[in-house]
Image: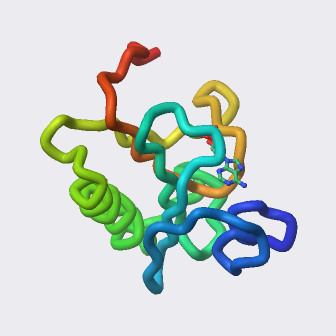
Amino acid sequence: MSNCIFCKIVREEAPAAIVYRDEQVTAFRDIHPAAPTHILIVPNRHIDSVNALTAEDESLAGHLLTVAGQLAAREGIAETGYRVITNTGPHGGQTVSHLHVHLIGGQPMRHPMG
Ligand code: AMP
């Protein structure tokens, strides 16, 4: 998607603090961090949201979580804990229509679910 900001970050056409990249996903620091660690992990291929995932994406969807865990360890927050969140659609609070996993930690999470 030519106008998608996360696609531009993946293609390195827009600036971002990239912390991890492989053939399937790219991870970079959120521009408005909600906690000391706030990393977004996105598929390199444009996928709008969880709604657009198909059975063929199961390996990729799992990889997003696996990378989240690896980056949590690298950030030193694996033992203290963290949140992994994927917002979907208007009620979910999704503001960027490119599937992404938030990895948030480094402080106790204050906001309850819902
Ligand atoms: P969501 O509201 O779940 O769609 O999350 C979108 C996230 O993307 C927000 O936390 C934004 O702060 C973050 N964000 C938007 N644009 C950028 C950008 N150019 N670089 C890094 N993070 C961004």
The residue depicted at 40 percent of the width and 18 percent of the height is: 113
Left or right of 106, for residue 10:
right
Q: Give how far across and how far down residue 48 sits, in percent.
A: 66, 57
The residue depicted at 75 percent of the width and 71 percent of the height is: 8
Question: Considering only vertical position in the picture, is 101 above or below 45?
Answer: above
The front one of 6 and 77 is 77
Q: Give how far across and how far down residue 20 sits, in percent.
A: 44, 72
The front one of 54 and 98 is 98
Q: Give how far across and how far down residue 37 sits, in percent.
A: 41, 43
> Would you identify the image quadrant in which residue 10 lies?
bottom right
Q: Give how far across and how far down residue 26 sits, in percent.
A: 51, 71
Question: Considering only vertical position in the picture, is 31 above or below 61?
Answer: above
Left or right of 98, for residue 38:
left
> Would you identify the image quadrant in which residue 99 lies?
bottom right
The residue depicted at 70 percent of the width and 51 percent of the height is: 97
Q: Residue furthest left?
A: 79
Which image quadrant: the N terminus? bottom right
Question: Considering only vertical position in the picture, is 3 above or below 95?
Answer: below
